[in-house]
Amino acid sequence: MPIKVTISGGIVLEKCLDSVYFKVDTSDDLDARTTDIGNTIEITGRVDVDFEPTAELYSWALIKPTSGNKSDVYRQVEVEVTSNKDNKLIRKVVFPEAFVVDYLENYSNEDGIGSFTLFLKQKKDNNEVVNVSGG
């Protein structure tokens, strides 16, 4: 399935992506539905010169929030998953104010290609504006 990730600030990933994992998380110890919901995206891919540059992901993860850099810390992230067969949209998820929870890179001498995992979360006070569409 083709996957495309677009992150505000000019980051577009397609060729380097391996998988995307979406999670809507609520507390497990409740007896009724809660308003305390967490929306997360886990993106995994490869780090190599033959793919899109991923150093900007690492740089984004390093930004410390201050009162003047909100647009650098919180970014719009759009993920589109389409079918291989007819290129129809299966799922589109937009987090308008995503931030980096964790960022990992891994390298191996044997493979010659690195891998990355980017863990994103939607800013909690804007969960109601997360947009989901598709088949």
Image (cartoon, helix red, strand yellow):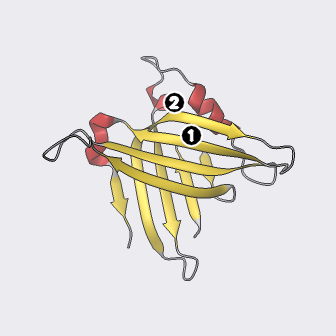
Give the quarter of the figure containing the C terminus. bottom left
SS type, badge 2: helix
Apparent side of residue 60 relative to residue 109 in the rendered image (left or right): left
Q: CA distance from mark 2 to mark 1?
A: 8 Å
* Rendered position, 8 above or below 125: below
Q: First in sequence: mark 2 or mark 1?
A: 1
Q: x, y percentage for residue 62?
A: 59, 25
Q: x, y percentage for residue 41?
A: 46, 48
- Which residue does the image show at 39% across and 51% down from the upper left? 23
Amino acid at dot 1: Gly
For label 1, the crowd category at 10 Å Cα-Cα, with few meaning under 14, some 14 to 19 and many 20 or more, is few
- Which residue does the image show at 40% across and 47% down from the upper left? 95
Which mark is drawn over residue 72?
A: 2
* Rendered position, 85 above or below 20: below
Query: Observer-nearest residue: 36 or 62?
Result: 36
- In the displayed orientation, state which residue is furthest to the top: 67
Q: x, y percentage for residue 122?
A: 38, 40
- Which residue does the image show at 44% across and 26% down from the upper left? 70
Residue corresponding to mark 1: 9
Amino acid at dot 2: Asp
Apparent side of residue 89 relative to residue 55 in the rendered image (left or right): left
Apparent side of residue 128 relative to residue 10 in the rendered image (left or right): left
Do residues under tags 2 and 1 come within 8 Å of each other at their CB atoms?
A: yes
Which mark is drawn over residue 45?
A: none
- In the displayed orientation, state which residue is furthest to the bottom: 85
Apparent side of residue 104 relative to residue 41 in the rendered image (left or right): right
SS type, badge 1: loop
